[in-house]
Image: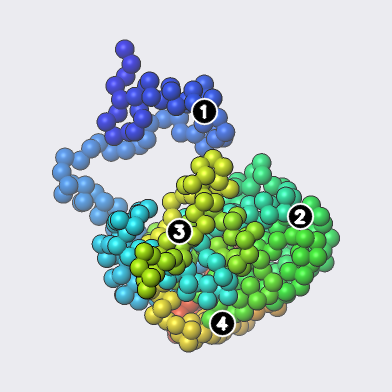
Amino acid sequence: MSAPAHPYVPNAAPQVRDAMLRAIGVGSVEELYGTIPPELRLKRPLNLPAPFASEHELRRHVTGLLADTMPAGRTVSFLGAGTYQHDVPEICREVAHRAEFLTDYAGEPYEDHGRWQALFEYTSLMAELLEMDVVSIPTYDGFQAAATALRMSVRLTGRRVVLLPQVLNPRKRARLEAFLDGFAQVEQVPCDPATGTADLDALGQLLDKQVAGVYVETPNAVGAIETQLDAIAHLAHRQGAVLVAGTEPLALGYLTPPARQGADIVCGDLQALGLGLAFGGARGGFIAVHDEPQFVFELPTRLFGLAPTTHADEIGFADVAYERTSLARREEGVEWVGTAAALSGITAAVYLSLLGPDGLAELGEAVAALTAYTMDQLAAIPGVEVPFGAAPHWREFAVRYRAPVATVNRLLRHHGITGGSGPEEVPALGGNASLLAVTEVHSKADIDLLASALRGVMA
């Protein structure tokens, strides 16, 4: 007799499972999972505690687990490496927790309650900030946005090679390579050892008629600003390649938007735009393009715009170019429309509308000044090296200690300081390298405390 279907697992009835496997031409569940490397497969039951008898017991257990964490702010933290401690105005949380937004998932007009308008406002604000015409609703995160943008470049050109920078977050590199596996060949562009940004001579040698897209970041994974983006765009376009630029939207009140320097597709993460920290950060990715049909119709995500209604004097908010999505075309879609981080976009819109152009400019300048001051202070300490110091930086920079990073960070904790990431976040530097991040939440006194503590640690 077959085992009974699990009451909480959909399609768990054996006959339903077998019918689904036959429909997709797979002989067994094991065959379906065959592409997952054996070392990643769990060969034992999950190590879960026995069920709790009451909500009170469950709450007590979870509260005990949370007590083992150290919230940002309990120490002076200089951690970054992709998730950053920026100030989150309370109104961002207030709006995001409104029932008409918080409970939305996909939503259609009859159950929307203003979410489509909120997302239209989000894309409008982002388009103005990025100096682009069309912005997707948020993808799952910035990693996915970059991967999708590179796949767009392959479809647009019909080519099968993409170029990634040597200085790149290793977790992002792994995600990009996985998403491009079997779709495009990935090659690496060496960095200039003085700046950590792209080596233009090396890029010129790698670029040929086989390259679909060139991916570049500014600020990049070590916070260095790419000052030659227009030259990179010229090299890419001369060979018919698409330039995909990853950027930090919070920096664009201070930095020149990549679109103004020749980028064809701009992407990134929304975490710094009022999403805050949540055990790795709330996330949402964005992809932006010019109003050119060949680019717009390669966007897999939903787009929202204005549309006429049955009343001549009214407009509404609706899907744009819906027919290109997998929701409309199913397996013929360019990519599958997945879970949208709509709430992240709505929160980012609140944040951007609150700060406005002047506020973003002031914040960008303040972070740039704090970054430069911190780099100067630490570079003067014996035993501390600041690589890539020839490049201007924003928010983040690399250091190299003469002692192991773990030892340095352990000693810094005695001073109430959470140090930077470990060398695994900056494999291009190896050794005792670390990343440190400073934002508007840090004061000059915080930075001076870090410098004083490091002098003692290195003594």
Separation of marks 1 and 4 at Cα, in angstroms: 51 Å
Separation of marks 4 and 2 at Cα, in angstroms: 31 Å
Residue 348 visible to an observer of this rendering: no
Q: Which three-letter amino acid code belongs to the residue tagged 3?
A: Asp
- Residue 317 locus on image (x, y percent): 40, 65
Q: Which residue is the site of mark 2?
A: 211
Closer to the camera in the image, 425 or 206: 206
Task: Give the SS element for disc 1.
Answer: loop
- Residue at x 72% of width, y 50% of height: 158
- Residue at x 36% of width, y 30% of height: 11
Separation of marks 4 and 3 at Cα, in angstroms: 32 Å
Q: Earlier in the sequence, mark 1 or mark 4?
A: 1
- Residue 305 locus on image (x, y percent): 46, 65
Q: Which residue is the site of mark 3?
A: 319
Q: Earlier in the sequence, mark 4 or mark 2?
A: 2
Q: Which mark is residue 24?
A: 1
Closer to the camera in the image, 246 or 119: 119
Q: Which mark is residue 336?
A: none
Q: Which three-letter amino acid code belongs to the residue tagged 1?
A: Ile
Task: Determine crowd level at label 2: few under 14, some 14-19, many 20+ residues with C-alpha closer than 10 A.
Answer: many
Separation of marks 3 and 1 at Cα, in angstroms: 31 Å
Q: Which residue is the site of mark 4?
A: 254
Marks 2, 3: nearer the viewer: 3
Which corner quadrant holds the C terminus? bottom right
- Residue at x 27% of width, y 31% of height: 7
